[in-house]
Amino acid sequence: MLTFAQKTSQVLLHMVVAFGVTYGFTGSLAVGGLAAVVEPICNVLVLPLHDRAWGRLRRRLARAGGGIRGMGQPSAGQVMATGQVMAAGSTPA
């Protein structure tokens, strides 16, 4: 039940954002309303393709024994979100 509520909330959020942005740019309630309906439908159609592409990329990287840099801990000398620079072999505080 909670998952259904969360998904419904996400769809409504998409609709409100699409309406607000489109109305803000065009000043048209009709165009904003159209965008509020069309945008979530497009997301539903495109999201599975996006997930499938990322799944293929992950499988390809797993077969090659590689990974995506930046998906784990920052590398040596990489700037952390706090603005600190990590030294080689150190871990985030």
Image (cartoon, grey):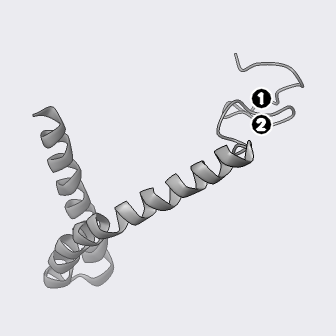
Q: Which residue is mark 2?
A: 79
- Residue 45 in the image, given as x and y percentages of width and height: 29, 69
Task: Mark 2 or mark 1: name the one nearer the start of the chain.
Answer: 2
- Residue 36 in the image, given as x and y percentages of width and height: 20, 71
Q: Residue at x 77, y 29 (%)?
A: 84
Is residue 87 shown above or below 7?
A: above
Q: Is residue 1 left or right of residue 89?
A: left
Camera-side residue of 67 and 78: 67
Q: Residue at x 65, y 44 (%)?
A: 62
Camera-side residue of 76 and 83: 76
- Within 10 Å of disc 1 (Cα), the crowding (few <14, some 14-19, many 20+) is few
Type of residue at label 2?
Val
Quadrant occupied by the N terminus? top left
Q: Secondary structure at mark 2?
A: loop
Q: Secondary structure at mark 1?
A: loop
Is residue 21 shown above or below 91?
A: below
- Residue 67 in the image, given as x and y percentages of width and height: 70, 43
Q: Is residue 65 left or right of residue 39?
A: right
Which numbered disc covers residue 84? Answer: 1
Q: CA distance from mark 2 to mark 1?
A: 6 Å
Is residue 68 shown above or below 36?
A: above
- Residue 32 in the image, given as x and y percentages of width and height: 20, 77
Quadrant occupied by the C terminus? top right
